Image (cartoon, rainbow, N blue to C red):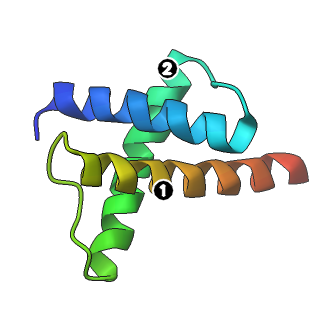
């Protein structure tokens, strides 16, 4: 998957993840970063569970990326509240 596809997938997944966790978007750049990190985390979780990973711009990859973005946001919010 090319870098433009990662950015698009990251933007969509980060925005959806932010809406689920924070009820609002986090800004375009933070949404992209959260989404890309979430895609890596979601792909890793999916591959460990035997479900496959993130392999392109498709619905399954988007679902895994959103799950990963939600996990990243929950961890980020937990750490941010402590400090």
| Crowd class of label 1 (few under 14; some 14 to 19; many from 20; radius 10 Å) | many
User: Does the image show residue 68?
Assistant: yes
- The residue to which callout 1 is attached is 67
Q: Position of residue 26 (x, y in %)?
A: 64, 25
Q: Secondary structure at mark 2?
A: helix
* Mark 2 vs 1, N-terminal side: 2
Residue 43 percent coordinates (x, y):
31, 61
Give whichever of 59, 78 is nearer the camera. 59
| Residue 28 appears left or right of 19 | left
**Where does the image place residue 76, in percent across and percent down from the top left?**
68, 49
Q: Residue furthest top?
A: 28
Q: Pointer 2: residues within 10 angstroms few (<14), some, or many (20+)?
A: few
> Considering only vertical position in the picture, is 49 above or below 61?
below
On the rendered image, what quadrant is the N terminus found in? top left
Q: Quadrant of residue 3?
A: top left
* Tag of residue 29: 2
Left or right: residue 69 versus residue 44 is right
- Could you tell me which residue is drawn at 88 percent across and 54 percent down? 82
Query: Is residue 76 left or right of 83 when viewed as pictured?
Result: left
- Residue furthest to the front: 59
Query: Which residue lies at the image location 56% right of the left edge and 41% below the top edge?
Result: 17
> Regarding mark 1 in the picture, which secondary structure is present there?
helix
């Amino acid at each position: 998957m090319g870098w433009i596809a990662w950015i698009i997938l990251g933007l969509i997944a980060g925005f959806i993840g932010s809406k689920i966790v924070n009820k609002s978007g986090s800004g375009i750049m933070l949404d992209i970063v959260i989404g890309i990190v979430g895609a890596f985390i979601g792909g890793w979780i999916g591959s460990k569970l035997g479900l496959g990973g993130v392999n392109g711009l498709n619905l399954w990859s988007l679902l895994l990326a959103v799950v990963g973005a939600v996990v990243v946001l929950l961890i980020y919010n937990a750490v941010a509240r402590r400090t």
